[in-house]
Image (tube, grey):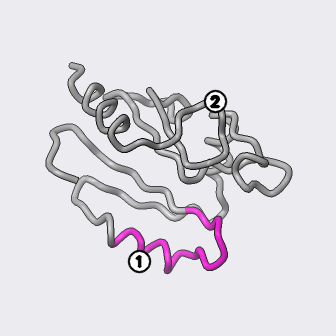
Amino acid sequence: MRSVPGLRAYFVWVPMLPGDDEHVAKEAARRFAEPRALHYWDSERYFARRMAAALDISAKASLGDGLEGFAWDIYLAYERGAIEIERPAFWMHQLAVQHAPRLDASIWLAKVQALLARP
């Protein structure tokens, strides 16, 4: 991440694919090491379930366990000072979700820059 005032990044790593574990997550986190970035390991998928419910991500759309969905491979952006984690200003994904845009780096960048430009 290049230096952008006011920008912070939070990564929540979850075990979704075979071989995903805390060690693998720590290795992946090293690729995104940055002073403004914090990394978390969600071994029980608590955050993944909470955000799936908030964003209406079904089990079918997210490779969930058949009962509930998991929010993973999602990208959430919040306005400065936001406190409700279930209400991002906008979000994108890499899942089989139809009601939100798929990740597009140029669109993501433009939307984040617009959020950062707000007072």
Asked whether 95 or 49 is in front, the reply is: 95
Asked whether 102 or 72 is in front, the reply is: 102
> Secondary structure beneath disc 1?
helix
Identify the amino acid type marked 1. Glu
Magenta span contains residue 71: no
| Residue at the right extreme of this rendering | 67
The residue that disc 1 covers is 27
Q: Quadrant of residue 93?
A: top right
Q: Which stretch appears magenta?
A: 14-30
Q: Of circles 1 and 2, which is in front?
A: 2
- Residue 31 lies, in percent from the top left, at 33, 70
Q: Quadrant of residue 104?
A: top left
Asked whether 50 or 3 is in front, the reply is: 3
CA gap, disc 1 and disc 2: 32 Å
Q: Residue at x 21, y 37 (%)?
A: 6
Q: Residue at x 54, y 53 (%)?
A: 73
Q: Which numbered disc flags the more N-terminal residue, 1 or 2? A: 1
> Secondary structure beneath disc 2?
loop
Q: Residues within 10 Å of mark 1 (few under 14, many from 20)?
A: few
Q: Is residue 51 above or below residue 14?
A: above
Q: Residues within 10 Å of mark 2 (few under 14, many from 20)?
A: few
Q: Residue at x 52, y 40 (%)?
A: 102
The residue that disc 2 covers is 99
- Residue 55 lies, in percent from the top left, at 63, 34
Q: Is residue 8 above or below residue 84?
A: below
Q: Residue at x 41, y 77 (%)?
A: 27
- Label count reads 2
Identify the amino acid type marked 2. His
